Amino acid sequence: MTTIRFEKVSKSFGDYNAVQDLNLEIKDGEFMVFVGPSGCGKTTTLRMLAGLETPTYGRIYLDNDDVTLAAPGKRDVAMVFQSYALYPHMTVRKNLAFGPEVRGEPKAAIAKRVEQVSELVGLQSLLHRRPSELSGGQRQRVALGRAMIREPRIFLLDEPLSNLDAALRTHMRTEISELQRKLGVTTVYVTHDQVEAMTMGHRIAVFSHGRILQVDTPARLYGAPANKSVATFIGSPKMNILPARLAPGAGHVTVNCLGTVFTLPSLSLTSALPPEMIELGIRPDDIHWTKDAPSRCTEKMSGTVISLETTGSETFVIVDIQGVEVNSRFPSFVQIKIGDQVDLLFDRSDVHLFDATSGDSLRDVSSIVEMSALSHVK
């Protein structure tokens, strides 16, 4: 098993900076997910790790080995792409065995390894079939099995589920996570889908414009985003970002957001003096209809319903409050309609405060977790 380390890695294509000053360490046996919108640098970073791109600056290490300039074949990594890239004229067995055969490994060892890997990924009954006779999920398993059979130092997966339908994607997420747990191989997984990232990764690196905005566990990214960009990217529906004012007091600050006024202890803020004008973030899941709100929710906003979206288990209601759209969670198939006046409640410990200029969080991470835990106990 292997650790991965990027030290001040940058990659430019002409005048375009795809990756800028990347510093990241991935632990031995960790499942690390790179997530972000298209063009954010996540795939370029993966390709540099695989040796398919050379960094413009910086160094890449596998354990203590500097592989920055090493050829792909010298890195002992296995990569699975969005395209399955299977040999159409070969059976599943031949596809799995092709790599070891090219490397000249003993036939008996290859046959044994093919049986072991096919059992691990559930392909035992399909070894005689060709790729055209397989479903999308089965072909993805063959691609995974082909990567596994070489027993690499690290696995690299570049959006491997993009070609699958929604139900199969959910199933394969579980299978890949379970395989990684069994094998214990350091794995880097690239996706633009934040649901995949949140459900699969031990830690997640959120990319934007060639830089990492935050690296953390799924729970911390969701509950304590470092900035507004992370806050709005992680979570579906995305976090509400609302205009607010902040007034310091003795041991506390007063927050005024769309006419709702409440206080927070000063200790819950970062040491930097926050600006008068800020932005307040709160997730739709944390804003409730007054008739269905938990007892801990005491802060109230009122407005007019302008949109409803029922998902089956719940309904998300967009409410116009002083000209600002606020998304909130209501019970499933609630008996309200567009144009109704509604009251919304939330708990002050669920809010996030951001610098209106830089987008950086103004809340102390430890205080958010502590306050949230205490409020939910009540």
Image (cartoon, rainbow, N blue to C red):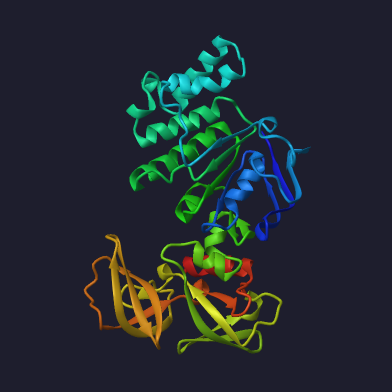
Relative depth, front residue between 219 and 105:
105
Extreme residue toward the front, this view: 14
Quarter of the image where the N terminus is located: top right
Q: Residue at image x 45%, y 70%?
A: 283
Above or below, 100 relative to 187? above
The image quarter containing residue 325 is: bottom left
Judged left or right of residue 355, residue 291 is left
Write down the quadrant of residue 105 in the picture.
top right
Residue 94, compared with residue 37, is above or below; it is: above
Quick check: 210 above or below 362? above
- Figure check: 131 above or below 55: above
Residue displayed at 24% across by 71% down: 334
x, y percentage for residue 182? Answer: 53, 32
The picture places residue 242, in percent across and down from the top left corner, at 48, 80
Dividing the picture into quadrants, the one containing residue 2 is: top right
Residue 282 is situated, as x and y percent measured from the top left of the image, at 48, 73
**Image coords of residue 360 (percent x, y):** 62, 72
Measuring 45% from the left and 54% from the top, which residue is drawn there? 195
Q: Nearer the viewer, residue 8 or 153?
A: 8
Q: Looking at the image, how many numbered discs can be counted on the residues? A: 0
Residue at point 23%, 76% (across, down): 336
Q: Is residue 58 left or right of residue 329?
A: right
